[in-house]
Image (spheres, coloured by chain):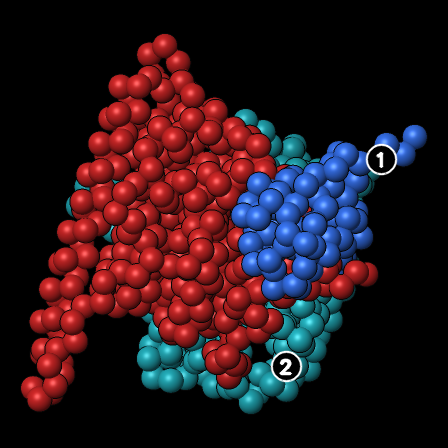
Chain colours: A blue, B cyan, C red
Amino acid sequence: MLIPLSKPGTTTDIKTGKWKTHRPTVDPKLCTKCAICQNFCPEGIMGTPREIPVIDYDYCKGCSMCMVECPFKAITMVAEKQEL
Amino acid sequence: MIKTTNGATALAETAKNCEPEVVAGYPITPTTHVVEEMNRYYANGETKSFIAVESEFSALSALIGGAAAGARTFTATGSQGLLLMHEVLFCSSGMRLPIVMVVGNRSVSAPLSIWNDEQDSVSQRDTGWIQLYAKNNQEASDALIQAYFIAEKTFIPVMVCVDGHFLTHTTEQVDIPSKDEIKRFLPPFKPMVTLDPDQPLSMGVYAAPAYYQEFRMDLHSDLEKSAAVISDAGKRFGQVFGRSYGLVEEYHVKDAKEVLVGLGSAMENVKAAVDEMRKQGKKVGALHVRVLRPFPREELRRILSGKHVGVIDRALSPGAQPPLFTEIVEALQGTSSTVSSFFGALGGRTLKIQESKQLFEKMSKGKALKEWITVTVEKNEAEIETC
Amino acid sequence: MSQQSEMHLFAPGHSGCPGCAPSTVLIHVVDTLGKDIIVVNATGCMEITSSQYPHSAWRVPYIHSLFENAPAVASGISAALKAKGNHHTKVVVIAGDGSTYDIAFGSLSGMLERGDDVIYCCYDNELYANTGVQKSGATPIGAATTTSQAGKVHHGKEKERKPIVEIAAAHNIPYAASASIAFVADFQAKLKKAAQISGSKFITVNAPCALGAGFDGSISMKVARLAVQSRMWFLFEYENGFFKLNFNPKVAKPVAEYMQLQKRFRHLTPEEIEKIQKLCDHHYIEMLERQKASDAKKIVFDAVTQPPSTPPASPSAPAAPKT
């Protein structure tokens, strides 16, 4: 019997990181661990709140929201290396 | 135990004795007092829930939630209410939720009519639900108990279709098994999957073209295979309660030249007509199609080939041949049967014994016929329309 | 599997647009309410992007049925849980504004009138996003969508939004609130409060749609914040009939500042924007009036319900929430 069901959390199979043209990088010297970026990230892949963000680039779509929202300008977007 | 009551009340007591955990109710003639009775049981603490919903669309939707959470469910509706459920009918069968529902057959608007025919349930025959039909209130209650057995084994929802007024509002003697007696036939419901925080799953997902059709093919083949489960249920029911059932019911068909075939309570009149004509030596028979979905194609072919078959449709496909007629013609393809089509008796008109005999006489001429059943009804201005 | 990708009850890998504010809403709803919940999701962007067979981003039990029946499905689940003696698992509806304000509005009202034990959370992106940006009952006045177009004769949406929170509260449910994804702490607090209340709870959380409203995904939160700062969107709650304005800065940002970030308002003339500014000012006064009326009612209510010896509690001024 085929029931239209999916197993939990299986979208992790889909590496949306391929979407991005730029990736956010965090400067630990400027980061105050305020967690704003971690609270806002629509993919939820910026690591443990209140710690220096560690981004999972397999899923980051490069939307730059974290850069825009960071009050301390600790995040900069860096162009992806083009894999030919 | 034997109760003398109307069909709707008997169905409600039967449903209560099947111990549904989630019951939703919305009023509509002719099944209003099914849900009223269910609410009385709830008010007296005999059932666990009664969701007084704000529409039939929500009635069936609530049962999708209930069934997905692993509960046995029940509701009743008909006519406009069943049509409003159309989208939810497809959804509940597609999600393989074993919901059971009574349909009090009533014609479809417009024009508005609160009277009986089978246009409502027949028009929903492609929604992936099993459809059982009953000729009388004993069959209706028995079908409801078997509906739970069938649904919970096949994981396909089941409609028990009962003619409005002619059955729901007609008082008959009905043997309604008690809760314990039913337990001898109906095992406890064991859901296939449920919404469970300890084992989270996502139900009702989206399927892209690469995946979609297989789900529909699977439902179709399981619906076809459910015929065996329905037959088995009918036999088991006979072993426990002494009344057994099949996909169809033959009455003097074996040696009959002409056979009238149809759904629901009109077939009781046809059976009476057969009795009278048999006394005059006429070889006529009646066949009640108890299961419209899955369509008992092989069984009908086996039983009816070689005979003059008159198909009674109290439902229409405007602009095309009537529904039951087309399916029986297809089933009898390549046999030597002649198939006539008699359609009508709509909006409260029924096929009385007299009209049934006239149809047999017309068929005895041998030619295949296609005729409206008009059934003259005196125009009673004083008749108060209630709905 | 990386530690980050395992952290939330809503997994990454879903197909929300880059910078999709409603996706952020989902993470906070399930993380705040926890594992012991059942999510009922209406058809919509967040459904299609999170549960495409054989995948699902949801790490909690999840069911999607149709576009217009999430509240009824939730009622059925709630009844099933109670019938089985489960009084702890929470039933949570998550739906967009198309479903909530429009096509499921009847089903929603039915559920609220029954007071079923459900937390209803609407991610309010103010339009039908999944079908390509059509007007919904939540679309603000003036906004252009594909079904409220800016043409020569008709110039964007000509009516104000449907006051859905007030309508929900008018069902005499214990809790109805308006939140914003840009004010995460306030939104989380409202979810937590709703989780402690039994009966029907309604929260709509503003989460603008970059694609639909016409701005880059990176500034979704900036637009959401400005919506509140410009008083195009208010943060408030009704608790057992008492009103509380949660965010009340003395000086508002001009509506024009909020609008000029978004394509959907670009067609508006200065006069039209001014008219909308006046509407916002008018609504702000309305909010203050509601606060006063509610405070007065509380004084009378406390006096009546509290024993005479203790003085009635003075109404607390609305504290600005931490962002």
Residue at 24% over, 57% down: C170
Q: Residue C272: percent from the left, percent from the top?
A: 29, 21
User: Chain under label 1?
Assistant: A
Looking at this view, is B165 or C227 the one in front? C227
Task: Tell me which corner region of the image, top left, top right, bottom left or bottom right, holds residue C26.
Answer: bottom right
Of all residues, the one furthest to the right in this rendering is A84
Residue C99 percent across, percent down from the top left: 46, 45
Residue C203: image quadrant is bottom left
Labels 1 and 2 touching (C-beta < 8 A): no
Q: Secondary structure at mark 1?
A: loop
Q: Would you say C224 lies left or right of C26 here?
A: left
| Location of residue A17 in the rendering, given as x and y in whole percent from the top left corner | 77, 44
Quick check: can you spot residue C267? yes
- Binning the other alpha carbons within 10 Å of mark 2 as few (below 14), some (14 to 19) or many (20 upward) gives few
Residue count near mark 1 (Cα–Cα under 10 Å), binned few <14, some 14–19, many ≥20? few
* Residue for point 14% across, 57% down: C292
Q: Is residue B145 above or below residue B330?
A: below
Give the amino acid at mark 1: Lys
Residue type at mark 2 is: Pro
On whether disc 1 and disc 2 are found on a single subunit, the reply is no
- Marker disc for residue B188: 2
Viewer-nearest residue: C13 or B57: C13
Specify the subunit that label 2 lies on: B
Question: Quick one: B293 or C165, which is closer to the camera?
Answer: C165
Disc 1 or disc 2, which is closer to the eye? Answer: 1
On the rendered structure, is B284 left or right of C151?
right
Q: Position of residue B245 (x, y in %)?
A: 65, 69
Q: Which residue is mark 1?
A: A81
Q: Which mark is residue B189?
A: none
Mark 1 and mark 2: Cα distance apart in space: 60 Å
